[in-house]
Image (cartoon, rainbow, N blue to C red):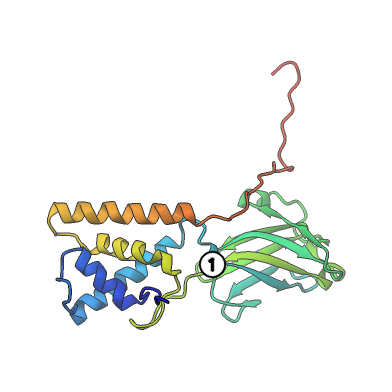
Amino acid sequence: MTAPADNTPLSIITDAYVAAGLIELGDTISPEQLVAGMRKLTGMINLWQTQGLKLWLNVETPVTLVASQSTYALKPAGDVDMTKPLRVLTAIYVDSNNIRRPLVTLAWDDYMRLSQITQTGAVNSYFVNKKQSELSVFFWLIPDSTAATGTVNLLLQVQVTNFVNVIETMNFPIEWRLALEWGLADEICTGQPQAIMDRCELRANQHRIALENWDVEDSPTRITPDQRMSASYGRFR
Protein backbone atom coordinates (compact mmCIF):
# COMPACT_ATOMS: atom_id res chain seq x y z
CA MET A 1 0.00 0.00 0.00
CA THR A 2 1.35 3.43 -0.97
CA ALA A 3 2.12 5.71 1.99
CA PRO A 4 0.31 9.06 2.04
CA ALA A 5 2.11 12.12 0.72
CA ASP A 6 4.45 13.93 3.06
CA ASN A 7 2.44 16.59 4.91
CA THR A 8 5.15 18.36 6.90
CA PRO A 9 5.97 22.09 6.86
CA LEU A 10 9.44 21.33 5.49
CA SER A 11 8.15 19.46 2.45
CA ILE A 12 5.41 22.03 1.74
CA ILE A 13 7.80 24.99 2.07
CA THR A 14 10.42 23.30 -0.12
CA ASP A 15 7.89 22.47 -2.84
CA ALA A 16 6.50 26.01 -2.68
CA TYR A 17 9.96 27.49 -3.28
CA VAL A 18 10.37 25.17 -6.27
CA ALA A 19 6.91 26.11 -7.62
CA ALA A 20 7.78 29.79 -7.23
CA GLY A 21 11.04 29.29 -9.17
CA LEU A 22 13.19 30.38 -6.24
CA ILE A 23 15.12 27.11 -6.02
CA GLU A 24 15.67 24.21 -8.41
CA LEU A 25 14.19 20.76 -7.88
CA GLY A 26 16.54 18.81 -5.62
CA ASP A 27 18.09 21.91 -4.06
CA THR A 28 18.02 22.48 -0.31
CA ILE A 29 16.45 25.71 0.88
CA SER A 30 18.57 28.01 3.01
CA PRO A 31 17.87 28.56 6.72
CA GLU A 32 16.71 32.10 5.90
CA GLN A 33 14.26 30.81 3.27
CA LEU A 34 12.98 28.19 5.70
CA VAL A 35 12.35 30.74 8.46
CA ALA A 36 10.58 33.09 6.05
CA GLY A 37 8.56 30.20 4.62
CA MET A 38 7.46 29.05 8.08
CA ARG A 39 6.42 32.59 9.00
CA LYS A 40 4.43 33.10 5.81
CA LEU A 41 2.87 29.62 5.91
CA THR A 42 1.74 30.15 9.51
CA GLY A 43 0.20 33.52 8.66
CA MET A 44 -1.55 32.10 5.60
CA ILE A 45 -3.00 29.19 7.57
CA ASN A 46 -4.27 31.49 10.32
CA LEU A 47 -6.02 33.59 7.68
CA TRP A 48 -7.49 30.55 5.91
CA GLN A 49 -9.16 29.47 9.14
CA THR A 50 -11.54 32.42 8.73
CA GLN A 51 -12.69 31.18 5.31
CA GLY A 52 -14.97 28.23 4.64
CA LEU A 53 -16.24 25.63 7.08
CA LYS A 54 -13.09 23.61 7.85
CA LEU A 55 -15.19 20.73 9.12
CA TRP A 56 -12.35 18.96 10.92
CA LEU A 57 -12.08 22.00 13.23
CA ASN A 58 -15.69 21.73 14.44
CA VAL A 59 -15.84 20.39 18.00
CA GLU A 60 -18.82 19.98 20.32
CA THR A 61 -17.78 21.35 23.69
CA PRO A 62 -19.87 21.20 26.90
CA VAL A 63 -20.10 24.19 29.23
CA THR A 64 -20.85 23.36 32.86
CA LEU A 65 -23.44 25.86 34.06
CA VAL A 66 -23.33 27.58 37.44
CA ALA A 67 -26.50 28.98 38.99
CA SER A 68 -26.67 32.78 38.63
CA GLN A 69 -23.50 32.93 36.47
CA SER A 70 -24.28 34.61 33.16
CA THR A 71 -20.97 34.72 31.27
CA TYR A 72 -18.42 31.99 30.59
CA ALA A 73 -14.91 32.59 29.22
CA LEU A 74 -13.43 30.16 26.71
CA LYS A 75 -9.67 30.59 27.03
CA PRO A 76 -6.65 29.03 28.76
CA ALA A 77 -7.49 28.76 32.49
CA GLY A 78 -10.98 30.12 31.78
CA ASP A 79 -14.39 28.70 32.65
CA VAL A 80 -13.74 26.37 29.71
CA ASP A 81 -10.01 25.74 29.71
CA MET A 82 -8.97 25.74 26.05
CA THR A 83 -7.21 27.74 23.37
CA LYS A 84 -9.48 30.58 22.32
CA PRO A 85 -11.83 29.16 19.64
CA LEU A 86 -12.59 31.11 16.49
CA ARG A 87 -16.37 31.13 16.73
CA VAL A 88 -19.49 29.46 18.12
CA LEU A 89 -21.46 27.90 15.28
CA THR A 90 -24.53 26.82 17.25
CA ALA A 91 -25.56 25.71 20.73
CA ILE A 92 -27.97 23.36 22.48
CA TYR A 93 -29.11 22.97 26.07
CA VAL A 94 -28.95 19.43 27.49
CA ASP A 95 -30.97 18.89 30.66
CA SER A 96 -30.33 16.37 33.44
CA ASN A 97 -32.43 13.78 31.57
CA ASN A 98 -30.24 14.20 28.47
CA ILE A 99 -33.06 15.90 26.55
CA ARG A 100 -31.70 18.40 24.04
CA ARG A 101 -33.16 21.64 22.72
CA PRO A 102 -31.60 24.32 20.50
CA LEU A 103 -30.71 27.78 21.74
CA VAL A 104 -31.20 31.02 19.83
CA THR A 105 -28.13 33.07 19.00
CA LEU A 106 -28.18 36.78 19.87
CA ALA A 107 -26.42 39.54 17.94
CA TRP A 108 -25.04 42.63 19.65
CA ASP A 109 -28.27 44.49 18.87
CA ASP A 110 -30.37 41.70 20.42
CA TYR A 111 -28.15 41.67 23.50
CA MET A 112 -28.34 45.44 23.93
CA ARG A 113 -32.14 45.36 23.70
CA LEU A 114 -32.62 42.84 26.51
CA SER A 115 -34.75 44.59 29.10
CA GLN A 116 -33.96 42.38 32.12
CA ILE A 117 -30.38 41.29 31.68
CA THR A 118 -30.15 39.83 35.20
CA GLN A 119 -33.27 37.67 34.97
CA THR A 120 -32.72 34.02 35.85
CA GLY A 121 -34.58 30.97 34.57
CA ALA A 122 -34.34 28.40 31.80
CA VAL A 123 -31.61 29.17 29.26
CA ASN A 124 -33.03 29.93 25.81
CA SER A 125 -30.45 32.17 24.10
CA TYR A 126 -26.74 32.91 23.94
CA PHE A 127 -24.58 35.86 22.96
CA VAL A 128 -20.94 35.51 21.87
CA ASN A 129 -18.48 38.31 22.57
CA LYS A 130 -15.34 37.84 20.43
CA LYS A 131 -12.60 39.41 22.52
CA GLN A 132 -8.93 39.63 21.66
CA SER A 133 -7.75 36.88 24.01
CA GLU A 134 -10.95 34.98 24.74
CA LEU A 135 -14.39 34.09 23.50
CA SER A 136 -16.98 34.89 26.16
CA VAL A 137 -20.48 33.44 25.96
CA PHE A 138 -23.42 35.06 27.77
CA PHE A 139 -26.48 32.87 28.44
CA TRP A 140 -29.97 34.26 28.78
CA LEU A 141 -31.98 33.70 30.75
CA ILE A 142 -29.18 33.44 33.29
CA PRO A 143 -29.29 29.83 34.50
CA ASP A 144 -31.15 29.33 37.76
CA SER A 145 -30.59 26.35 40.08
CA THR A 146 -32.74 24.08 37.91
CA ALA A 147 -31.11 25.12 34.62
CA ALA A 148 -27.68 24.66 36.21
CA THR A 149 -28.33 20.92 36.53
CA GLY A 150 -27.87 20.70 32.76
CA THR A 151 -25.15 21.82 30.36
CA VAL A 152 -24.89 23.91 27.24
CA ASN A 153 -23.09 22.18 24.39
CA LEU A 154 -21.41 24.61 22.02
CA LEU A 155 -20.43 23.65 18.50
CA LEU A 156 -17.13 25.48 18.18
CA GLN A 157 -14.77 26.10 15.32
CA VAL A 158 -11.42 25.70 17.04
CA GLN A 159 -8.07 26.98 15.84
CA VAL A 160 -5.63 25.01 13.73
CA THR A 161 -2.68 23.89 15.85
CA ASN A 162 0.28 25.92 14.60
CA PHE A 163 3.38 23.85 13.93
CA VAL A 164 6.49 24.37 16.05
CA ASN A 165 9.01 22.38 14.00
CA VAL A 166 9.39 21.65 10.31
CA ILE A 167 9.08 17.86 10.40
CA GLU A 168 5.81 17.43 12.30
CA THR A 169 2.56 16.49 10.59
CA MET A 170 0.44 19.57 10.03
CA ASN A 171 -3.05 20.05 11.42
CA PHE A 172 -4.52 19.95 7.91
CA PRO A 173 -5.93 16.87 6.16
CA ILE A 174 -3.67 15.46 3.45
CA GLU A 175 -6.05 16.59 0.69
CA TRP A 176 -5.15 20.20 1.51
CA ARG A 177 -1.45 19.72 0.74
CA LEU A 178 -1.43 21.11 -2.81
CA ALA A 179 -3.53 24.10 -1.76
CA LEU A 180 -1.02 24.89 1.00
CA GLU A 181 1.93 24.44 -1.36
CA TRP A 182 0.58 26.71 -4.10
CA GLY A 183 -0.89 29.18 -1.63
CA LEU A 184 2.55 29.62 -0.11
CA ALA A 185 4.15 29.79 -3.56
CA ASP A 186 1.79 32.66 -4.38
CA GLU A 187 2.87 34.42 -1.17
CA ILE A 188 6.62 34.15 -1.83
CA CYS A 189 6.84 34.64 -5.60
CA THR A 190 6.82 38.45 -5.52
CA GLY A 191 9.54 39.80 -7.81
CA GLN A 192 9.64 36.71 -10.00
CA PRO A 193 8.86 36.90 -13.74
CA GLN A 194 5.22 37.76 -14.43
CA ALA A 195 4.52 34.33 -15.92
CA ILE A 196 5.57 32.62 -12.68
CA MET A 197 3.54 35.01 -10.52
CA ASP A 198 0.48 34.50 -12.73
CA ARG A 199 0.84 30.72 -12.58
CA CYS A 200 1.22 30.71 -8.79
CA GLU A 201 -1.81 32.95 -8.33
CA LEU A 202 -3.93 30.85 -10.69
CA ARG A 203 -2.98 27.50 -9.16
CA ALA A 204 -3.37 28.83 -5.59
CA ASN A 205 -6.89 30.09 -6.31
CA GLN A 206 -7.90 26.92 -8.17
CA HIS A 207 -6.79 24.57 -5.40
CA ARG A 208 -8.23 26.60 -2.52
CA ILE A 209 -11.60 27.20 -4.18
CA ALA A 210 -11.91 23.52 -5.06
CA LEU A 211 -11.24 22.50 -1.47
CA GLU A 212 -13.53 25.16 0.03
CA ASN A 213 -16.31 23.82 -2.22
CA TRP A 214 -15.52 20.26 -1.15
CA ASP A 215 -15.33 21.04 2.57
CA VAL A 216 -19.08 20.87 3.16
CA GLU A 217 -21.34 18.57 5.12
CA ASP A 218 -22.62 15.45 3.38
CA SER A 219 -26.20 16.03 4.45
CA PRO A 220 -28.16 19.10 3.35
CA THR A 221 -28.52 22.07 5.68
CA ARG A 222 -32.06 23.19 6.51
CA ILE A 223 -32.61 26.92 6.87
CA THR A 224 -35.53 27.95 9.07
CA PRO A 225 -36.84 31.51 9.53
CA ASP A 226 -35.87 33.34 12.69
CA GLN A 227 -39.14 33.40 14.64
CA ARG A 228 -38.08 36.55 16.48
CA MET A 229 -38.57 38.57 13.31
CA SER A 230 -41.82 38.86 11.42
CA ALA A 231 -43.63 41.45 9.37
CA SER A 232 -47.32 41.86 8.81
CA TYR A 233 -49.01 44.23 6.46
CA GLY A 234 -52.53 45.52 6.25
CA ARG A 235 -54.26 46.71 3.17
CA PHE A 236 -52.57 50.10 3.34
CA ARG A 237 -48.81 50.53 3.60
Mark 1 is surrounded, within 10 Å at the Cα level, by few (under 14), some (14 to 19) or many (20 or more) other residues, namely some
- What residue lies at 54% left-to-right and 67% top-to-bottom? 57
Q: Is residue 188 left or right of residue 132?
A: left
Estimate the x, y position of residue 131 in percent, counting from the top left: 54, 65
Image quarter (top left, top right, bottom left or bottom right) of the C terminus: top right
Q: Nearer the viewer, residue 226 or 72?
A: 226
According to the image, label 1 marks what residue?
57
Residue at 78%, 55% in the rendered image: 116
Which image quadrant for residue 130? Answer: bottom right
Q: Position of residue 224 (x, y in %)?
A: 69, 43
State the image coordinates of residue 64 (x, y, percent, origin top left): 74, 74
Q: Is residue 116 left or right of residue 3?
A: right
Q: Is residue 20 above or below residue 113?
A: below
Could you tell me which residue is drawn at 40 percent across and 52 percent down? Answer: 209
Position of 198 relative to 10 (above/below): above
Where is residue 118, by image quadrant? bottom right
Secondary structure state at the residue bearing disc 1: helix
Q: Is residue 219 above or below residue 84?
A: above
> What amino acid is found at the position of numbered circle 1 in the picture?
Leu
Instruction: Identify which residue, 216 or 150, lies in the foreground.
Output: 216
Q: Which residue in the rendered view is the most extreme toward the front?
A: 1
Quarter containing the N terminus: bottom left
Q: Residue at x 54, y 72 (%)?
A: 84
Which of these two is toward me, 214 or 205?
A: 214
State which quadrant residue 188 falls in.
bottom left
